Amino acid sequence: MTALAQPVVSASSPTKRRVRLLVALVVTIAVLALIALASLAIGTRQVAFPDVIHALVSPVDGNADHLVVRELRIPRLVVGLMAGVALGLVGTVLQGVTRNPIADPGLLGINAGASFAVVLAIATLGVTQPLGFVWFAFGGAALAALLVFVIGSSGRDGATPVKLALTGAALTALLTPLVTLVLIGDGDTLARFRFWSVGSLAGRGLDVAAALWPFLVAGVVVAALLGRRLNLLALGDDVARGLGARLGTTRVLAAVAVIVLAGTATSLVGPIALVGLVVPHLARPIAGGDYRWILVFSALFGPALLLAADVVGRVVVAPAELEAGIIVAFIGAPVLIAIVRRSTVRSI
């Protein structure tokens, strides 16, 4: 593993750089808005863009297009926006605090913890509804993240990137066969778990979003507070400590952000991989090495990628659908290969 790129010292003036970042921010928000509009219009039932606008601002009772937009696609859009923000931020925080460019919730055992908790809930308590999965997925993800940070922080050197990654890999290796063992012996549990585990925005209502938005807001606030601290941490422990950074406090705050954001995202859409891994690498070429801006762009690129994958999944095998988690894997894998081939992470 290697440290992430050091903060970039731009040759342009601070004013020009700030203007460039603001322009990029406006363009990114516009692209996200267009993708969000497409997610309301495109699907098994195509709805014209003017009708989408009418459904939002002046819905007509009995209009089938308006009903599809308001009852089915708006909840799907809200869930995708929330999960995308959480996944984008959790990937950035994980890569920053571990100084590991391939860190994501899957690598640190968080997805495995959520999956194990959901399987147990289905098999032992008979939970069948998405709103019921939410709290078990959240608890499993949070417990797994906490366990990895506690074990990875033990010892003289504290929570080093290697120790955290190895602890997460060990936890995943422990829980994955346990999940398989439960599923092999229970066909009903397998059928219910399979839908949740592929990662989908469908079938989640606004009740799920309403239950989890306070956690998302809390995670976003904590992540936003970490920007400057992650900039110092990117310089290395010794330099950061010399510049006055409180490494223990930074890692505790990062752990809180990861637990809350990963738990929220996994509870909303299941264990979707690669979004948290890829998004920070898409943000860095625009934001440079400043984590304050990387966090901002990651919070926008995450939902853009997730919603785009959801829209593509609705049309590639129409009239059926592919879940967003499958499309993200197809989109994310080539992007990840391109990232690895770049010079900044060539020594991984």
Image (cartoon, rainbow, N blue to C red):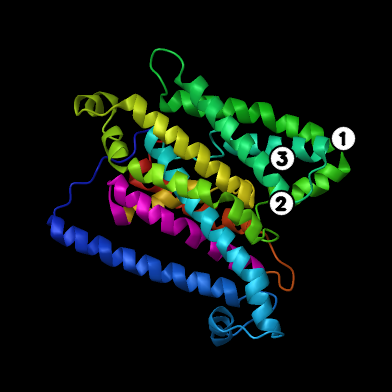
Q: Quick one: 306 or 345, which is closer to the camera?
A: 306
Q: Which residue shows up at 38% across the image and 34% down it?
A: 97
> 95 left or right of 55?
left
> 171 left or right of 176?
left
Q: Which mark is residue 118?
A: 3
Mark 1 lies on residue:
185
Q: Which mark is residue 130?
A: 2
In the depicted structure, whether residue 102 falls above or below residue 251: below
Q: Which residue shows up at 64% across the image and 28% down it?
A: 173
Of discs 3 and 2, which sits in the foreground? 2
In the depicted structure, whether residue 174 falls above or below residue 263: above
Q: Quadrant of the N terminus?
A: top left
Q: Amino acid at mark 1?
A: Gly
**Range of residues picked out in magenta:** 286-315
**Is 287 included in the stretch rendered in magenta?**
yes
Of discs 1 and 3, which sits in the foreground? 3
Q: Quick one: 297 or 73, which is closer to the camera?
A: 73
Where's residue 323, x and y in %? 67, 59
Where's residue 74, x and y in %? 60, 69
Q: Quadrant of residue 282?
A: bottom left
Q: Which residue shows up at 32% across the image and 38% down it?
A: 230
Magenta stretch: helix, strand or loop mostly: helix
Q: Amino acid at mark 2?
A: Pro
Does residue 336 show up?
Answer: no
Circles 1, 3 touching at the beta carbon (< 8 Å): no
Q: Which mark is residue 336?
A: none
